[in-house]
Amino acid sequence: MTEQYQIPNQTLTIEEDIKHSRFITVLFHCSSELGLKCALTNIKLEYPGANHYCYAFVASDPQNSIAIGSSDDGEPAGSAGRPMLATLQGSNIGEIGAIVVRYFGGTKLGVGGLVRAYSSGIKSGLTELETKTKYIRYSTKLSCSYPQLNQIEYLVNQFDGVISNKVFTDVIEIEFEIAKAFHDEFNRELATQTQGQLKAKFNV
């Protein structure tokens, strides 16, 4: 399983004129199909009256072949969405979406020309796109005393973790997630902070 991968750290827009048609390519972070649909709605408002709004997305890690999708939006089958998706999949970037807006300029490009046109902006944008590393986090649960809570919260934050739940009774049940690369170091620090009283067992 992929423990870490690159994801977009910005939204990037590339505009090109190809044989009198205007192609506007938008690359953005996309972690779900719903996120893609929201972005599509916004882009249709930003660029109204276009002839086509084609898209492709990889909503998980770059090797994921399930959380993906594409649309030709009225262009000839296979001339837009599929080549867009293939370009995204070849980038080794995860959680990425691409929408290409086309204002038709009167000159037909043919299927081969469309494949090149719809891929062009993505290829160009990928060379400029700022990315950041996403780590796959694994969950664990600890029971701690009230004085220990601040120490644990501090450590989770230091190791780029996420606290998902806290239950307060006579002790505190705290659930959190940390990337696998940090598990051993986290437990070493946790043992130091709690005089060896606590150790996290992660659901890997």
Image (tube, grey):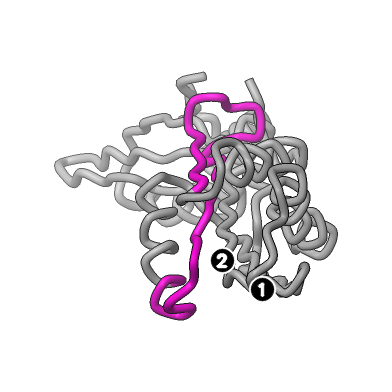
Outermost residue on the left side: it is 169
The residue positioned 30% from the left and 50% from the top of the image is: 146
> Disc 2 residue type?
Val
Q: Nearer the viewer, residue 160 or 102?
A: 102
* Residue 152 shows in the view: no
Stretch of the chain drawn in magenta = 43-72
Look at the picture and state if 111 lies above or below 129: above
Q: Nearer the viewer, residue 114 or 92?
A: 114
Q: Kindly state the secondary structure of the residue where label 2 is placed.
A: strand
Q: Is residue 83 left or right of residue 138?
A: right
The residue positioned 51% from the left and 41% from the top of the image is: 70
Q: Which residue is mark 2?
A: 101
Residue 193 spot, x, y in % from top left: 56, 44
Q: Nearer the viewer, residue 104 or 122?
A: 104
> Disc 1 residue type?
Arg
Residue 37 spot, x, y in % from top left: 38, 55
Mark count = 2
The residue positioned 26% from the left and 42% from the top of the image is: 172
Residue 123 spot, x, y in % from top left: 80, 54
* Residue 119 shows in the view: yes
Residue 65 highlighted magenta (yes or no) = yes
Q: Quadrant of residue 129?
A: bottom right
Q: Report the disc number at residue 22.
A: 1
Look at the picture and state if 167 lies above or below 38: above
The residue positioned 42% from the left and 30% from the top of the image is: 140
